Structures are given as C-alpha cells and as structure tokens.
Amino acid sequence: LKSELGLFEYESKALAYELINEYELDMVLVTKGRNGAFALDRENNYYEDQGYQIDLIDTVGSGVAFSAGFMHYYLSGKGIDDSLKFGNAAGALTSATHGATKFISKSKIITLIKNGKRQ
C-alpha cells in the first residue's frame, strides 16, 4: 500500500482508519514487506509486528500466505498480536522459496516465530 500510493507510515495508519470508518470495517491489515505488518481495529487499537530476516528469493504468494496465516490464527481464537506474528512468519517463509509454495507446515511457521531473526 505504502509503495503504491507513496505514503509514509503515519499516513498508512490514517488511511487504514479512514477505510474502517468509510466502509464500517472491524479491522484493516497492512503488510509492509520486509518490515512486517500492522493492524488497526475499529476502536483505533494499533498492532504491529516486525518482519523477519530471511534470504529473499521470490515474493510471489507471500501476501496470500500472510493473509491465510493471519486468518487461520485469528479465526481459531488467537489475538491480533499472535495472528500478525503467524501471518508474517507464513509470508516470510513463502518469500524464501521459488514461486508460490504449495504448503508450509505450521511447525515451520512456529519455529520461525520462536527462533527467527527480526528486522
């Protein structure tokens, strides 16, 4: 979002809040590439998770992996913070392979969360 619209981070937060109000959303998620992601909810609670240091190979599918990882955790009853961590790790692992991967195990994602180097 930031690179496409030429926004600074604080402007991204303001835009997320505008989207929440304009479209009556409960939450907006914004990925920031190697710098992680943030979530802003209707109550203006801001959550952020740093990116992981990985050997970047290909970003194809990393956004989808982030979204799937976040939703998997969030819909399983996990909090927004844990869901951001899980989504970021899923996206990072996808970026460390060639092309969109068919499957990344939950155990690999959790291992990256526990042991991975952060930006």
Image (cartoon, helix red, strand yellow):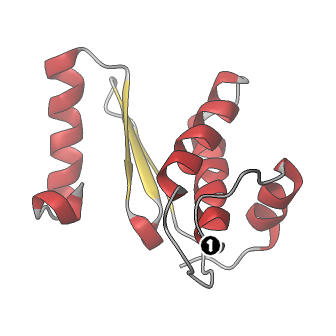
User: Does residue 78 appear in this view?
Assistant: yes
Q: Nearer the viewer, residue 39 or 43?
A: 39
Q: Nearer the viewer, residue 97 or 114?
A: 97
Q: Residue at x 58, y 56 (%)?
A: 88
Could you tell me residue 25's position as x and y percent?
31, 19
Q: Quadrant of the N terminus?
A: bottom left
Identify whether 62 is placed above or below 39: below
Identify whether 85 is placed above or below 111: above
Q: Is residue 91 found left or right of 102 in the rendered image?
A: left
Identify whether 55 is placed above or below 12: below
Could you tell me residue 89's position as x and y percent?
66, 59
The residue under label 1 is 98
Q: Residue at x 58, y 66 (%)?
A: 99
> For the residue marked with disc 1, what is the amino acid?
His
Could you tell me residue 49's position as x and y percent?
52, 58
Query: Which secondary structure lies at badge 1?
Result: loop
Q: Residue at x 80, y 73 (%)?
A: 115
